[in-house]
Image: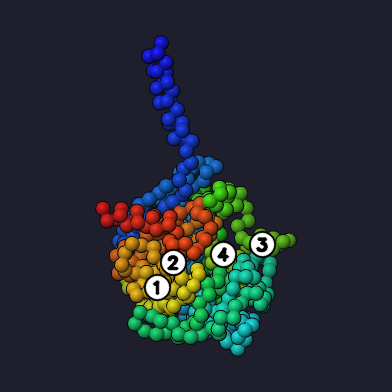
Amino acid sequence: MRGMIRRLIIALALVATPAAAQDAAPPPATVVVAFDRDTITPLIVEGLANKETGRALEANDPVRIASISKLIMALTALRLADEGKVDLDRDVSDYLGWTLRSPYHPDAPVTLAHLLSHRAGLSDAAGYSIPLGESLEAKFADPAAWRDVGPPGGRVKAMEFDLPDPADFEYANLGSAAVATVLEAASGERYDRLVERLVFAPLGVKACLNWIGCGPDMQARAVTLYRHTGEVAADGATRLPPACTIPVAKGQACDLESYVPGTNASIFSPQGGVRIGMMDLAKIGQALMQADKSGLLKQATFERLASFADGGETGAKELFCHYGLGLQFIQMPESDCDDRLFDTEYPWIGHPGEAYGLLSGLWFDVDGKQGFAYFITEAPPPVGGDDTGNFTTAEKALMARALEMVSE
């Protein structure tokens, strides 16, 4: 009898173990892709693209990459400059048809270079999403949209040269709305179509802004973003087409066909609304890594993009100590900036992202030998002030794991 009971207990334990494992929560959706000049390799693909359906994540599933979108915006602006349709150093008021000025410095022109490098004196205190049907001009007329951090202007440091460009750094998402609208006004093209023509299509990338232009096949592979508390933060099933995917003012129809380019490109979320898979994001990294051969930008234009300026020395600005026209340098030698992500002695170039429980990054080393595109989901909001620096412990651990994998 004892032997029978013992065998029954063992059998029940064997049956129960897989069930317990099955009940364990899956890891947060995470993708890391490595790239060099010639190859793109998925390294880490974990978790579920959507918890409700249980669909497993795939390496190139499109995800909202947050502020890496600003780098794509900068590439669009510089490509348009190479076409001769826009001047980075011209007063943007000339394109907009109304005067964009800081109330603290009403005589100082604001340029695309100021806006792209966060040195126009803007603030997000007034909000930075301007819905369809509301006025971009009115948003910038709000005094809360500005900081008194000095007039736009000054000098930007570059690796071997100086360029006339903006002054005091203050990170602000609002500037992206102005940049994208200026690009529309200068070209006569809608911002999402500009990005497709100038960046995505030439690089063979499948991506879009706010799901506009991403067909049903990409929408079916959307990565739902969850907060660390478990609730849906972005791109759940009810927030994809045919639902309206752009911000719309109350009483306004969700109708892009009547939208006039050059009036309010904030509706495309240029500051963070790009949806793209990591394999495709790595293609953009490759083009930057080998800018001398990719032909994406003229050499002088790329040098302008790759110039950098000192950011700040306190708070969150420590992450942006060396930020240029939408392209960032981290881990610079002889720098006290708290911006270490990789356990290496050399600098990295790219852009980070953080929003809706997601942390993302596109980075390649300064010698152009190795790069990574990644995202992590279900991340708690950044707290700052701890001993891990401005990149989180989770991001640092993920990049340490990726570096170990590529060195094997």
- 2 vs 1, front mark: 1
128 relative to 358 in the view: left or right: right
User: Who comes first in sequence, dot 2 or dot 4?
Assistant: 4
Residue 269 is marked as 4
59 and 355: which is toward the camera: 355
Residues packed near mark 1 inside 10 Å, few (<14), some (14 to 19) or many (20 plus): few
Residue 117 is marked as none
What is the distance, in whole Å, between disc 1 and disc 4 at their CAs?
Answer: 33 Å
- 3 vs 1, front mark: 1
Report the residue at 43% width, 57% height from top: 393
Instruction: Name the image quarter holding residue 97.
Output: bottom right
Residue 336 is marked as 1
User: Who comes first in sequence, dot 3 or dot 2?
Assistant: 3
Q: Amino acid at mark 3?
A: Val
- 1 vs 4, front mark: 1
Q: Position of residue 175 (x, y in %)?
A: 56, 73
Q: Position of residue 377 (x, y in %)?
A: 49, 53
